[in-house]
Image: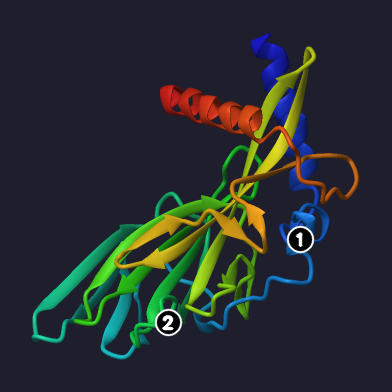
């Protein structure tokens, strides 16, 4: 059974890797999202981060630099206290830096998109540095099939209530139904709240998380088996955690 499960996931991975990430906005977004979500305005700061001998001011008073495979972000808060954050770049394969006031608190936040080499799938990691009113950054992290370009993350969208941004998350999971394994997308969304990213329970009238089955052609139909699919997703998360 484990061999079958692995094979099914491998096929899904192969199919997913054949198309650009943007295709999933066209092919698998839940129907109510189509034509209603809009990318949040973002400023491109850098479209590459060399692993060494690189430095740039990424927002007012904040500098990013690299040395020997590490990214250092440093600045000073409103009281004049220096702060520094350090990230290891060795596990990533390229990065983009964007800036935007995600929570509309008047302080520009920083978003860094990192490409990874995860099992043939172009999964990516996003680090979000939320700056509070005192100018201190608070790091949050999200993993998904993020699509980005010079305009920013397509997954970073405007909140329907107008109060900042939402980060749309897509997770690929699978479930056994009537003796067969089926892959599906789990859609959720995070919003900046205080110094954290927290899940929202609804978007465009759709209860989240929402589930759309992975098929060989575009599919926008939301599954009604949300309880079963959420259980399958959580079980898969546990399996992955045990294997790490």
Q: Which residue is mark 2?
A: 101
Frontmost residue, 63 versus 165: 165
Residue density around tag 1, few if under 14, some if 14–19, many if 20 or more, within 10 Å? some
Frontmost residue, 232 versus 72: 232
Q: Is any part of residue 170 visible from this angle?
A: yes
For the N terminus, the quadrant is top right
Spatial distance from mark 1 to mark 2, Cα to Cα? 26 Å
Q: In the current view of this chain or complex, which residue is farthest to the front?
A: 205
For the C terminus, the quadrant is top left
Identified at 80% across, 14% down, the residue is: 178
Identified at 26% across, 62% down, the residue is: 86
Viewed as shown, does residue 21 lie left or right of 84?
right
Frontmost residue, 201 versus 38: 201
Question: x, y (%) of residue 91?
Answer: 44, 49
Q: Quadrant of residue 54?
A: bottom left
State which tag comes first along the sequence, 1 or 2. 1
Q: Which residue is mark 1?
A: 32
């Amino acid at each position: 059974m484990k061999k079958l499960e692995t094979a099914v996931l491998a096929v899904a991975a192969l199919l997913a890797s054949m198309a650009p990430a943007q295709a999933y906005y066209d092919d698998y977004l839940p129907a109510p999202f189509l034509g209603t979500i809009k990318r949040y305005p973002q400023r491109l700061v850098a479209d590459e981060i060399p692993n060494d001998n690189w430095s740039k001011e990424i927002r007012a008073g904040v500098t990013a630099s690299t040395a020997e495979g590490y990214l250092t972000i440093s600045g000073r808060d409103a009281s004049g206290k220096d702060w520094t954050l350090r990230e290891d770049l060795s596990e990533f394969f390229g990065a983009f830096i964007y800036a935007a006031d995600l929570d509309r608190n008047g302080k520009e936040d920083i978003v860094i998109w990192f490409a990874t080499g995860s099992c043939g799938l172009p999964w990516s990691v996003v680090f979000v540095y939320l700056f509070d009113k005192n100018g201190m950054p608070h790091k949050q992290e999200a993993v998904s099939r993020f699509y980005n370009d010079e305009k920013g993350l397509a997954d970073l969208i405007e909140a329907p209530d107008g109060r900042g941004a939402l980060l749309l998350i897509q997770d690929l999971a699978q479930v056994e139904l009537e003796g067969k394994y089926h892959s599906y997308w789990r859609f959720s969304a995070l919003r900046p709240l205080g110094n954290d990213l927290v899940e929202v329970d609804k978007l465009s009238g759709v209860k989240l998380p929402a589930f759309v089955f992975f098929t060989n052609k575009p599919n926008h139909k939301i599954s009604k088996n949300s309880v079963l699919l959420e259980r399958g997703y959580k079980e898969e998360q546990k399996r992955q955690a045990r294997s790490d």
